[in-house]
Image (tube, rainbow, N blue to C red):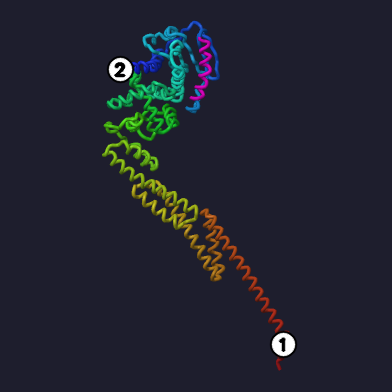
Amino acid sequence: MDCLTEKIMIRLRLWLITLAALCAWLAGGVALAQPTWIEQSTAYFRLVYAPEDEAIAGEYALIIDTLYNELSTTFAFQPTTPLTLRLYPTSESYFTANPAARNVPGVIAHADFRRREVVVIVERARRQSETAQINNLRHELTHIFAAELSNGRLNVGLQEGIAQYMELPGPDRDDKIAILRDLTQRGELWTWAVLDDRDAIYGQPELSYPQTWSIVTFLIERDGFEQFRRLLTALPQSSGYRSAMAAIYGVSATTLESEWRAWLPAFLQLEPAALPPAVIDLAPAQALLAAGDYDRALRELERLDAIADAETQNRIAALQARAQIGQRANQLTEAARTALLNGEYEQAERLIGQAEQAYREINDNRQATVLAEYRARVARGLQAGEALRRADAQARRFDIFGAQANAEAAAREFAALGDEVRRDNALALRRSLAEQQRTLAAALLFLGAAGLAIRLIGRQLWPAPEAW
């Protein structure tokens, strides 16, 4: 098979998948017309089929609930059931119900999320492999999940991208890889502006489908499936996919597109030859810096640095330096807090000074109030510590009353600061002083009593001489 024929065959295979969605669009408002239907219920579906397809309907009944459960687990979401799986026995019966699709060849299956229905043409599906028939269902059922999660706001490009992503691997993936390699090497990748363009996506599916699949694959490899799911749920509250991407991924869609172009060569196992300069939007990273989210800003700047040109890399380096100072200032602030909690007041004072200096370098005043409060607590802790040291020194000089006053003051201040260790030390000293005071009082009382007794005994033994 020559190269031209192979390309034609690849395009024809892609049309089989693509034209189903186009047909659903064209036929959206046409009433169904089938003389006889049999219905069968599963846990999540209402199967509708012709009498002659009872056997294959039984096979689909065994598959469709399993696929629903798999997708529900993946998307962490369950569309309201029952959904409908309608099996048209022949192409003619399908065209009778959908006249607008008669001039669109190649349709095998489609999904109508408005009717919450998946349709399969049995006559055509029978010619496919088992994997291809399962992928028909996975692809179309994914459309319903994505549409319900996004409240119908997911654009056509990303819809087709996620539907392909959820398919099982098959020969058509090799075809997509081949087309993507060719487009990349020739510098003819489409811009993401076409993701909203229904005519472009369905007008050249042999080019659009591989690219939309690779875009969704990139987004999921970049930040995981859960983040892509958040994109779907953010769309109903967004003005479009670009604003939703900026909110969910922290960078603009323009930057994401540049990252995708830089990611593709490795994904396709190509040398990253002369790719066009990436268009870098630094505004989201600058917004993270302005908000004081230095850790996240550094992560985004590091990602952008790998795809930026020399001039933009210089700007990124300046932003990274600022972010690193802010990150260090935040770390110093947290370390100062830990030192305060541990009663390490001298260490906390040093850390607070270093944090204040770092914040001044980047003109960030957000933590000024917090650091001022920390400094005030440090001053109180140092004063309480000094009072405790004076109490200890006074106790050594037997200045009991002065030592007690300072120990009491230190205990109250440490208790107010939540410094239980030093509070207990101060209370222990106060108890010791009280014990010393009681011992001294007892000793003085004993000495006084002994002196009085000696005087009385002395008078008895040596009476005073009589005066003549």
- For residue 461, above or below residue 300: below
Q: Amino acid at mark 2?
A: Asp
Residue that sits furthest to the top in the current view: 35
Magenta stretch, main secondary structure class: helix
Q: Position of residue 188 (x, y in %)?
A: 28, 25
* Residue at x 71% of width, y 81% of height: 456
Q: Is residue 151 visible?
A: no
* Residue at x 48% of width, y 12% of height: 87
**Label 1, residues with CA under 10 Å away: few <14, some 14-19, many ≥20:** few
Q: Is residue 432 left or right of residue 182?
A: right
Magenta segment: 53-71
Q: Position of residue 228 (x, y in %)?
A: 42, 30
Which image quadrant: the N terminus? Answer: top left
Element at label 2: loop
Q: Which residue is mark 1?
A: 463
Q: Position of residue 350 (x, y in %)?
A: 41, 56
Q: Which residue is mark 2?
A: 2
Residue that sits furthest to the bottom in the current view: 468
Which image quadrant: the C terminus? Answer: bottom right
Q: Amino acid at mark 1?
A: Pro
* Residue at x 28% of width, y 38% of height: 312
